[in-house]
Amino acid sequence: MEDQEIRSCLNACGFQSEQRERYLIFVRGGQTKAQIRLLWQQRKLLMDDLHTVQKQVDCIDYIIRSLERAEQTKE
């Protein structure tokens, strides 16, 4: 992978500029374990965000279902 392609991919994954540069330093230095460690750290952050958003969606779904049930009992 070329540097620009890696930067683009890391950017799409939510890496900050400093993290991207650090990752590229690891790439250039052949530090695969450090690359993997950085990727796992970012993955954990993304999964934490995903779980937070999922809880929010679940709350909205609950309210929608409650409102729909209330509407059905009116009919």
Image (cartoon, rainbow, N blue to C red):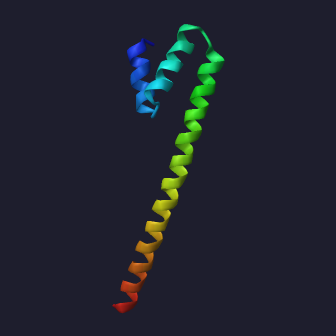
Q: Is residue 58 above or below residue 12?
A: below
Residue 69, quarter of the rendered image: bottom left
Residue beneath the point at 52% across and 41% down: 46
**Closer to the camera in the image, 59 or 45:** 45
Q: Residue furthest front?
A: 18
Q: Residue furthest bottom?
A: 74
Residue 56: percent from left, percent from top: 47, 61
Q: How many marks on residues?
A: 0
Quarter of the rendering occupied by the C terminus? bottom left
Residue beneath the point at 39% across and 24% down: 8
Q: Residue furthest right?
A: 33
Q: Is residue 40 above or below residue 20?
A: below
Residue 34, quarter of the rendered image: top right
Residue 16: percent from left, percent from top: 45, 30
Residue 44: percent from left, percent from top: 59, 39
Residue 37, quarter of the rendered image: top right
Residue beneath the point at 53% across and 8% down: 28
Residue 63: percent from left, percent from top: 44, 74
Q: Residue furthest left?
A: 75
Quarter of the rendering occupied by the N terminus? top left
